[in-house]
Image (cartoon, rainbow, N blue to C red):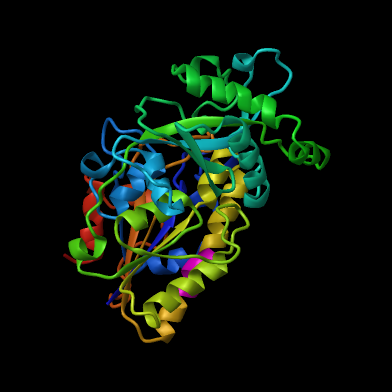
Amino acid sequence: MKYIVILCDGMADEPLEMLGGRTPLEASRTPNMDLLAQSSEIGMVRTVPAGMAPGSDTANLSVLGYDPQKYYSGRSPLEALSIGAELGDSDVSFRCNLVTLSEEEARYGDRTILDHSSGEISTEDAEVLLNALKEELETEGYTFYAGTSYRHLLIWHNGRTMELTAPHDILTRKIGEYLPSDPVLRDMMVRSYEILKDHPINVKRRAEGKNPANSAWFWGAGTRPALTSFEEKNGVRGVMISAVDLLKGIAVGAGMHNILVDGANGGLHTNYTGKGQAAVKALTEDGYDFVYVHIEAPDEMGHQGSAEDKIRAIEYIDAQVIGPVAEALDRAGVDFRMLVMPDHPTPVRVRTHTSDPVPYMLYDSTKKATGKDRYCEKTGRETGQYLEQGWKLLDRLLEK
């Protein structure tokens, strides 16, 4: 038996009037999910424990079978593992987003966050901008590391953790009350705007009608994590397929391998087909028992507030990942169990994460068709299947 998780980040949502009272998942054309639903267990699961922030960090730890209340030590340290940043025992890691701030106001604190991703800026452009910040802001106590697209890191050596707000949680709000209380971090953010606003990269982006990446934004503070080995814990050899440093970092911490797919960028137009093909190869040729395919696009479209693009992302996943993977494994004569689910909701209405339970679909290729004919939030609730401790769902997938 082989095992595969198709993690559709932020796919769960709320009924929308513009979609006739349906969610984006309900409104999507998903013939492959619907076919698998007939031989699947469908239900609801809480991936974010009560009292914890509904982030992709806590939620994906749950889906991978790690109790976030036991293993979570902050978001950015997991990303630090992915990009090879050195974290000492007394170091604190921060996510450093390159964001788009409004530019009409005189005071930095009066500006608003217009885009948490700077128009899904390319990694190449972002690295140039991050190097500009490194030249001006980096000191013996603070080190910047380039990541992917808008997602980068700052390490504060011998630093301290603090509560900071994620930029996607305060879109269109004035940023003054959300700035760090620490004067050095706050000053670096203010100075970052002056460094980046007229950088040639941003002058070019404005001319092309793109959002400028005109400020750094620090959040997600944490210390070095300690995850137990995924293989030792579960008895299966696992691999991660993701374009996002957070997920790649979780894999590193769990002793899983990472497969990098050309053209996978965490955006709406990522290489869906390549991810699916890599998953099939890992299971049928490379000796892996378990594959975790993480796809960021639905989450990004939720943050952008676009129901249309969120539907498009879901349909791409269905047509280019779920269907081809299931068909390829069937052709190879492989028995497999596939878990399809989001990590958390990212409702278009609020443009940020929520901690509500999410629908899951657990398909078994050896089972006959006895289930529902549709996978969505509504059918998840109708089945009555509910798992409060999301980190135990993996055991159900692995039939432990």
How far across and how far down the image is residue 134, in percent?
59, 37
In screen coordinates, is 287 left or right of 278? left
Nearest the camera: 29 or 152?
152
Q: Position of residue 357 (x, y in %)?
A: 33, 42
* Quarter occupied by residue 65: bottom left
Is any part of residue 342 visible from this angle? no
Magenta range is 318-325
Residue plotted at (44% across, 18% down): 182
Residue 216 drawn above or below residue 11? above
Above or below: residue 180 compared with residue 53:
above
Task: Give the side of residue 199 with respect to residue 250, left or right.
Answer: right
Answer with the quarter of the image where residue 374 lies. Answer: bottom left
From the top left corner, tell me how far across and down residue 391 is, in percent: 24, 50
Residue 390 seen by the camera: yes
Name the residue at the right extreme: 207
- Residue at the location (37% across, 29% down)? 159
